[in-house]
Image (tube, grey):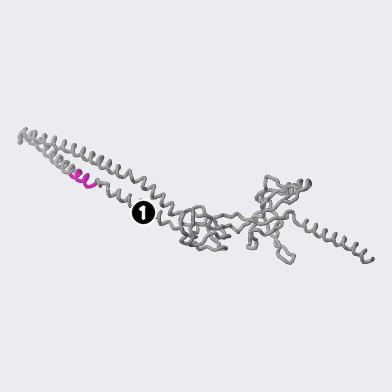
């Protein structure tokens, strides 16, 4: 009988001590949550077989690293065909330099003859003034000068006409070049998309494809995240909300084992603008009054923090 009385007295005391210990532990932190990261899913940008794809889960990749290659033989051949068509267009054009150079040489000869006759005219005029030459000789020279000037004028007109005709012919041929150049650029874009380029620096979390498999546009190849800094997603109550602000530094701790903790300094970077009810299977009227707000705390990772790890926040 006495033993039963002692049991009834001892059990409430132990329960009270345990509850007191729990309350003390809960008072040591203001919020708790799990770490997460901004994850990027890298997808194929071209259809074809994966000729190379050698990354592994856990690999650390730098931004811009080429991690694989999709077969783009078809696009490469089409690009070469368009380039060959452009080269053929240039072979169909006419080089105006030989013809124009011939006319220019003809004009140069005529110009030299004209200058010679002008000198001869000046000499003949002096002879006529000295009665050493006849007026007919001077008239013949003037007629020859006039003829040479007309020939030079005609030759210059021929030069301009030939330049215009050849330019128009070449312009008509080369008008087909611009669409072909656009085709080359289009095929080059398809070839470039065959290279799998890592878009962000980080660690490969999950690999979805293997070398030799077929890739299609939009198919996920791997998931990567920058683990240098993680986000702790925690929840605060409405009464705690006035005590926090964006940019505020807080203390974050994780369980280090043997009832010890590892501490970090974090910064509140986001506070939800909408409240939500505490997730519970059954919600009574009183529980519905307990609204919580999600926050994100950015924490520098020293290698010990992992995605999904539980942590506590104190401010």
Above-or-below relation of 205 to 133: below
Please state which of residues 229 and 16 is positioned toward the viewer in this rendering.
Answer: 16
Main secondary structure type of the part rendered in magenta? helix
Q: Residue at x 67, y 59 (%)?
A: 309
Give the secondary structure at mark 1.
helix
Would residue 99 be counted in the magenta stretch?
A: yes
Judge by depth and name the residue closer to the eye, 260 or 181: 181
Q: Split into 4 quadrants, where in the image is the N terminus?
A: bottom right
At which x and y percent is residue 61? 54, 60
Residue 74: quarter of image: bottom left
Q: Seen in the image, is 51 located left or right of residue 170? A: right
Give the residue pinned by disc 1: 80
Q: Which residues, given as a range, are shown in magenta?
A: 97-105
Residue at 70% x, 59% y: name it: 253
Q: Residue at x 17, y 43 (%)?
A: 106
Q: Position of residue 40 (x, y in %)?
A: 56, 54
């Amino acid at each position: 009988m006495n033993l039963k009385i002692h049991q009834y007295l001892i059990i409430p005391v132990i329960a009270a001590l345990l509850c007191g210990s729990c309350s003390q532990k809960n008072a040591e932190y203001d919020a708790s949550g799990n770490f997460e990261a901004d994850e990027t899913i890298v997808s194929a940008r071209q259809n074809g077989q994966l000729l190379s794809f050698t990354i592994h889960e856990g690999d650390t990749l730098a931004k811009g690293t080429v991690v694989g290659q999709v077969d783009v033989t078809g696009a490469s051949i089409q690009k070469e065909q368009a380039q060959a068509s452009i080269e053929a267009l240039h072979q169909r054009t006419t080089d105006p330099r030989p013809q124009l150079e011939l006319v220019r040489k003809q004009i140069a000869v005529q110009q030299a003859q004209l200058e010679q006759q002008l000198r001869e005219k000046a000499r003949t005029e002096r002879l006529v003034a000295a009665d050493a030459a006849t007026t007919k000789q001077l008239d013949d020279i003037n007629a020859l000068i006039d003829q040479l000037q007309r020939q030079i004028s005609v030759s210059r007109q021929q030069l301009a006409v030939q330049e215009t005709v050849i330019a128009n012919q070449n312009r008509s041929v080369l008008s087909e070049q611009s669409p072909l150049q656009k085709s080359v650029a289009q095929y080059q874009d398809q070839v470039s998309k065959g290279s799998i380029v890592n878009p962000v620096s980080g660690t490969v979390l999950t690999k979805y494809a293997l070398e030799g498999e077929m890739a299609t546009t939009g198919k996920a190849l791997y998931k990567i995240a920058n683990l240098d800094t993680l986000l702790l997603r925690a929840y605060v109550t409405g009464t705690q909300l006035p005590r926090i602000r964006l940019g505020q530094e807080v203390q974050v701790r994780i369980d280090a084992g043997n009832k010890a903790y590892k501490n970090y300094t974090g910064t509140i970077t986001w506070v939800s603008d909408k409240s939500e009810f505490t997730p519970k299977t059954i919600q009574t009227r009183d529980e519905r009054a307990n609204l919580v707000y999600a926050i994100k705390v950015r924490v520098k990772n020293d290698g010990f923090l992992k995605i999904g790890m539980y942590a506590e926040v104190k401010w």
